[in-house]
Amino acid sequence: MSNAGQTLGERVRSARRDAGLSQAQLAGDELTKGFISQIESGLVRPSIRSLQHIASKLGRSLDYFIADEPLAATKRVTFHRLAAEAAVERLDWSVADDESKAGLAVATDVVERATFLRLLASAALNQGRREEAFDRVTEGLALLDVAKQPLDVARLLYVRGLAYGDAGQLVASTEAFETVRDIVERYEILDPRLRARVAVALGTTYRRLGRTTKAIASYEIALATASRANELKLAAQGFMGIAVSHYDAGDLDAAIATYERALDLFERIADTSFELHVRQSLASIHFQQGHVAQARDLADRTIVRAAEVGDDHWGAVAQVVRARVLLSDGDAAEAKRLARQAERVLTSVGDQIQRAHALRVVAAASEARGETADADRAFKQAIELLSSIDDRADLSLAASEYSKVLRARGSIDEAFAMLELAQTRR
């Protein structure tokens, strides 16, 4: 049915009746029956947020109601920005794409355009289109002046840092995040969420580059900032980062205690992905400490929980820990099967670090079974993966492990070469 010639109120009434809803049902919990009645009578004009709620309830597009209404362009831009930002928060990247493109098509203000370009970059990065993400960030930065729009520049550079990290370019990623941090400090940007996220990101890149002291310091900053802002998720990420850094430094007791604090926060905010992350990390640390029963229990529970929520990624990571337990129990065949299965999943999701850990287990299990060719192949794959992303800490572990295997075989020269690689990468 055409809506030409109808007022906005008439369109709302017509669409409501077509949907078979009463005014109270259309209002729901967010609006009131009286407000809907006033809209339909033309006595009030709803805000973009209210109209978005109405359009969603009626299964209509916003344009159905406002296509030929005298709606200011700035309100359209505001609507699309809010819709895109909401989609990013709930990780709905296709909607974030659509709303950002719609907003970019009508936005004329350079800051608004840069905002839509940043949201498009985030959506592209999270859908595997890394080069597009870089292009969007570059286009957005070209519109801005850091002296006039420091916050917008910082947010774009943060996405660039994430893109470099996704590409395994840790030095470039660190430089981007450090630039963001410097802008935040120089221009006294008070956005606590950005401050906390940058500190978490820096902590992660520092840790992967083997700079444990700087990593812990950065995570501590993130934790303090997030806690002050009552951002439980970011606070939990801060605890998790600190735990990982303690683990890298060999302080396993501190790592376990901090992971448990992170897990408590993640459970409070029902963040299943990070809950699984923390659980499998605890399992790994318990195994390193020789607490095999606890490691087995945590790994098994994580695998079951991951299956319940459909999280193949963290389920596979937990399987690697379970495979280590099996290997320690002498079941090399099952350990190799489980680790190889996990490695395939981790390859599909693009987690190179955890894939390398899975390959290390495949290698160790193969060696235990006397399958030296398989062991060599898996060790070399793991070392090549970790070298490609410059993960110094994990590369040192893999090279040291391979060195011990080669030395036990009597291949002294090859073992020495691996030992040198391990030491130069610390």
Image (cartoon, rainbow, N blue to C red):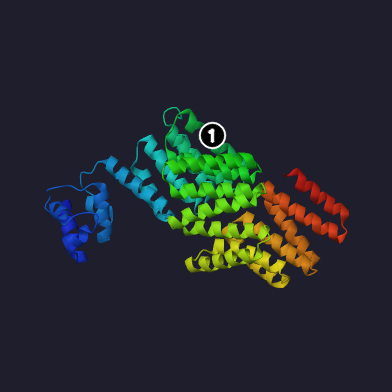
Q: Is residue 319 left or right of residue 362?
A: left
Q: Is residue 275 left or right of residue 362?
A: left
Q: Residue 147 at what x, y percent from top left?
A: 44, 27
**Residue 406 visible:** yes
Dot 1, how many residues are within 10 Å of its Cα: few (below 14), some (14-19), or many (20+)? some
Q: Residue 314 at what x, y percent from top left?
A: 55, 61
Q: Residue 100 at what x, y percent from top left?
A: 39, 47
Vertical side of 51 occupied by 152: above or below? above
**Residue 139 visible:** no
Q: Name the quadrant containing residue 218.
A: top right
Q: Name the quadrant containing residue 372.
A: bottom right
Q: Residue 339 at what x, y percent from top left?
A: 66, 66
- The quadrant the N terminus occupies is bottom left
Q: Residue at x 24, y 56 (%)?
A: 54
210 or 106, nearer to the observer: 210
110 or 418, nearer to the observer: 418
Vertical side of 157 occupied by 65: above or below? below
The residue indicated by pointer 1 is 179
Q: Residue at x 62, y 52 (%)?
A: 253
- The quadrant the C terminus occupies is top right
194 or 78, nearer to the observer: 194
| Mark 1 element type | helix
Q: Is residue 41 left or right of residue 31?
A: left
